Structures are given as C-alpha cells and as structure tokens.
Image (spheres, rainbow, N blue to C red):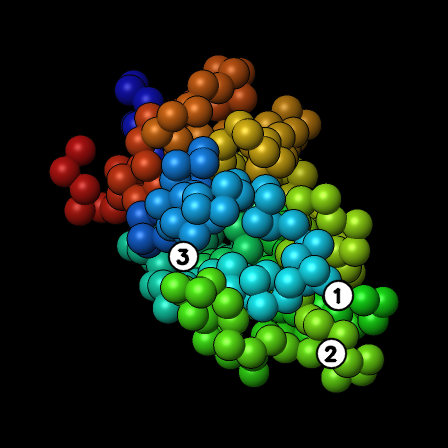
Amino acid sequence: MDSIEYAKSIIDEAEAIIITAGAGMGVDSGLPDFRGDNGFWKAYPVAKELGYNFSQMADPKWFKEDPKFAWAFYGHRLNLYRDTNPHEGFALLLDLVRRKNDNYFIYTSNVDGQFQKAGFDKNKIVEVHGSIHHMQCSQLCKKIVSAKEINIDVDMELFQAQEIPFCKKCGAVMRPNILMFNDWEWRESRVNEQHKSYRNWLKNALVSKIAIIEIGAGMAISTIRIEGQRVAKQLPFAKLIRINPRDYTIDPSLGLSLSCGAKDGLDLLLNAKSSH
C-alpha cells in the first residue's frame, strides 16, 4: 500500500477528525507567504525600504509609537483576509467532517478566519494566536470585541492608515486580538475558551479512531506540529497525516507525510475525482 492509499485508509476508518493548520494552508488561496524575509518583503515592499522584517513589523509597540503605521500593516491584512476566498481544499475538508457527523476540531495558528469563512463551526476552532477579526484595547481595558464594524483604508504609498479605531470605553487605540512578537498585553480570554472546548472534545474522543490532518505547518514556529504529534503519541487510536511541501519529515510511528502543498494534498486524499 502506498502512502496515499494508507492515508486514505486512515481517514476512511476515522470516527473523528482533527485538522491542524499553519500558514501554508492559506497560500493556495492567494495569501502572502511570509516564509523568510523575501516572502514578507514581496508582500510589503515598504517594510523592505525601512529595513523591517515580519517580527519587527508585528510588534505591538507601534500601536503606541505610531498607530497609523501599525494600522497600515494590520488594516491591510484585515482587508486582505476579508477579500480572500478559501481554496477548494477547505470545501473538501468540510465535506469530510460532515461525513464524520461533525465529530471534529480545528487547531490553527492562522489569524485569518478562513475556516469560519469556509463554513466550519466557529465553536470547533482553536485559533492559538488569536484572530484579526477581533479587537482589543491597547491599554488596560480587557474586553474583546468583533472587528465587523471596523473598516480601515490604507494609503499604501505613504503606508499609513487613513483612520484608526479607538476604544469606546477609555478612548485608547484599539489593536487586533492577535499574539504579536514581544507581546505582553495580548488578551487570551477568547482563545482560552476555545482551548477549553477543545480539551473537553478530546476527552470524549479518547476511544475514537482519530485522523489528524496537519496542513502547511512549518518548523520555525512549531506550535501546530507539536500539538498534532502530542495527540498522535498520547491517544492510542490516533494517526497523523502531514501535508507539507518542505518540512514533511515525520516519525513513522506517528503516521505518514505527503510532500506537497495544501490544496494538492487535500485533493489527492479527499477528492473522489482525483486522477490518482
């Protein structure tokens, strides 16, 4: 049995599905690949001119020092994620979990909200780094609010937001409810509730056959890989399927890997019309 047929058999026999997804999941939807400075600078040439890499741009200090600059970066990303449609792989996964009686959970480092946009249940998703579609006060207010009513126009030549959102409670600048670099002010309450729901679901799934489908999770920040591997090690009936074009190595005792991108890998595994 080759690796694709083995992976298909794991999925067919599974009673529950865990989808673990990193940044590579969004690339096939046309979202920028921030892998390395060159990928980031291609998406944000202004950052290259200023000599900033992703971690320097994604620093909460800008919301205090230069909020129009901070919101140029995050406002552009908010608009980009709102305008992006999830690729076909999301629909294939949604069909899969529906066939499994919606017995699934999603664990993702992506802040783009693409799983919700694709139709997955918002109560079955852990967004470990937060969500750009939710806001928090940059000062001491603890309330997290939806970004639905917030619209940011960005002058990309000046790289400045034309307007910035302010906290209705204290008047301070609002910021996305995202874990940034050097970030000691991120409000975790929303993600903590998601983790709680996930842990409760896992307890009920202990005796189930679980297929863990990991997609586009790199090694630079390995939060997503670690979670999938942890579950595969700890639960006796769990197997991990890793889909990654570069960082595809895996311990064979945990499962198997496919060396390809997100959409191609999901098409091979889940599309009945696939030519394989």
Q: Residue drawn 67% across and 44% down?
A: 181
Side of 152 relative to 65 (left or right): left
Give, as a three-letter code, the residue at label 3: Leu
**Picture disc at residue 138:** 1
Other residues around mark 1 within 10 Å, as few (<14) / some (14–19) / many (≥20): many
Give, as a three-letter code, the residue at label 1: Ser
Q: Nearer the viewer, residue 70 or 5?
A: 70
Residue 274 position in % (x across, y down): 18, 42
Q: Earlier in the sequence, mark 2 or mark 1?
A: 1
Q: Which residue is mark 3?
A: 94
Q: Residue drawn 60% across and 44% down?
A: 56
Callout 2: SS: loop
The quarter of the displayed image where residue 233 is located: top right
Q: Earlier in the sequence, mark 3 or mark 1?
A: 3
Quadrant containing the N terminus in the rendered view: top left
Quadrant containing the C terminus in the rendered view: top left
